[in-house]
Image: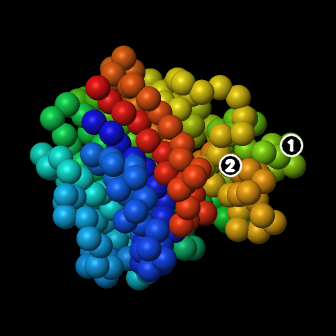
Amino acid sequence: MKLVSWNVNGLRGIHRKDLFVPAVKALNADVLCLQETKAEKGQAEIDLPDYEEFWNSSTRKKGYSGTAIFTKVKPKSVLLGLPDTIASKYKLSGDGYGDPNTEGRVITAEFDDFFLINVYTPNAKPDLSRLALRHKSWDPAFLAFAKQLEKKKPVVFCGDLNVAHTPLDLTNAKANEGEHGFTKEEREGIDKILAAGYIDSFRMFTEGTGHFTWWSNFGNARARNVGWRIDYFFVSEKLKSRIKSAKIYPELHGSDHCPVSVEII
């Protein structure tokens, strides 16, 4: 099964440019996870008859955030958001920006032998005004959710986690130390994911730097490959032997992010 994740940074916009459907056909995913859809189901007439669509759109603010799963394989169940019990335990009621659990940031599909979580992690913001919520509430709540599902069957989770984990995952690590997306608090969130037994699938196959998934729209950054790797697929240790490949697709345009994939056998 081929799983693809892509932050499309506005599904309607990329579709109007006639870049979305060709990219989806080129990727030929069995399951496609989208982040930052900034839309609701039906707002864009997308001709992908092989896929069934499941959406979690922001109810706090229209045209903001949002996730979706397009799948050729019918899921056994679909869950929107984080469970209320976990949201309450980790005080996800919101900050100055509002409740992140009403922003359409998580959608989970259950398949026969694993759960697939699609996540769009809150951005810490350039002034780090949302760092505390992310570090103290969101990251622990999300990991608790994955662990809860893990009790039933293995977990795969993917999406825009809005953090470069190591200096290898961005072009100018020294210059960005302490900036949003590369603070010790955000990176600690990934450390705890790894400590919990999840594997960064891309690093199973590829070492070194220069492998990025997001580029600024300024300074010709993408052409110069001045970027960050902030889009991931993490897999349960139980699935490690079944991961055939993990790839990044910088050649596919339309968003400031590019798609990433894993193939499970």
Q: Amino acid at mark 2?
A: Trp
Residue 94: x and y in percent read: 48, 67
Quadrant in the picture for residue 253: bottom right
- Answer few, some or many: residues within 10 Å of disc 2's Cα (few below 14, many 20 plus, some between 14 and 19): many
| Residue under numbered circle 1 | 174
The answer to whether residue 29 is left or right of residue 200 is left
User: In screen coordinates, is 48 left or right of 6?
Assistant: left
Where is residue 60 drawn, in percent x and y? 40, 78
Tell me the element at label 2: strand
Query: Residue shown at 28%/79% (left/top)?
Result: 45
Quarter of the rendering containing residue 37: bottom left
* Residue 128 sits above or below residue 191 on the image: below
Q: Residue 221, position in %: x, y? A: 76, 59
Looking at the image, which residue sits at the far right?
A: 175
**In which quadrant is the C terminus drawn?**
top left
Viewer-nearest residue: 147 or 27:
27
Q: Is residue 171 left or right of residue 130?
A: right
User: Which residue is located at x 39 percent, y 49 percent?
Assistant: 27
Contact? badges 2 and 1 (CB < 8 Å): no
Q: Which residue is mark 2?
A: 228
